[in-house]
Amino acid sequence: MSFKKTVRIYQGFLGVVGLITGIFLLILGLFGVFLQDISPGPITNLNELIGNWTYWSLVLGALLVLFLGWYVIDRYRKIEEFKDLMDTKSKSKFVKNIARLETLALTLGPDYEEEVLEKEREYRIRR
């Protein structure tokens, strides 16, 4: 399996892992730069270990939280929209929304693409 395909399959998981990492780095940076007086023991030890890189931890954590937070929320909304469009029992509504469904499926990954293809076979839609 190629790297690109693996990333497409696990893009949601990777986004959440990146977001959690960003939150950790942000907390580490906040305690290292601004909240040194009330920093818990393990975080103080980590901040002493990384030294002046604490500022970079703060910046990188903030960027990861900002961008990956947006990505995870956007992905969740697209999944909800995809489910709403796929729940139709009407062939005409499905055909009307097929362009949007295909766009969402391409964005969300191979499992969603397969769902659209299955629904097309179910309704006997030819292309």
Image (tube, rainbow, N blue to C red):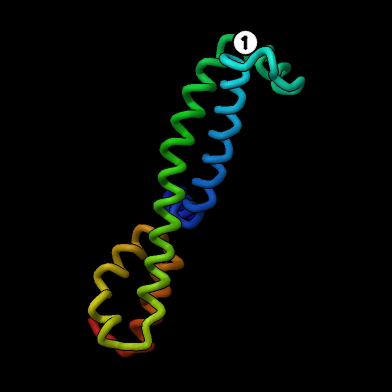
Q: Residue at x 38, y 60 (%)?
A: 78
Q: Position of residue 89 (x, y in %)?
A: 37, 87
Q: Residue at x 51, y 29 (%)?
A: 61
SS at mark 1 in the image: helix
Q: Is residue 115 left or right of residue 44?
A: left
Q: Nearer the viewer, residue 26 or 53?
A: 26
- Determine whether 67 is above or below 46 in the image: below
Q: Please identify the quarter of the rendering in which residue 113 is found.
A: bottom left
- Determine whether 34 is above or below 8 in the image: above
Q: Residue at x 65, y 13 (%)?
A: 36
Q: Position of residue 90 (x, y in %)?
A: 32, 88
Q: Residue at x 57, y 21 (%)?
A: 29
Where does label 1 land, which residue? Answer: 51
Q: Please identify the quarter of the rendering in which residue 109 is found.
A: bottom left
Q: Nearer the viewer, residue 98 or 9?
A: 98
Instruction: Classify mark 1: residues with Cα within 10 Å, few (<14), some (14-19) or many (20+).
Output: few
Query: Which residue is at the far right?
Result: 41
- Determine whether 46 is above or below 97 in the image: above
Amino acid type, mark 1: Gly
Q: Quadrant of the C terminus?
A: bottom left
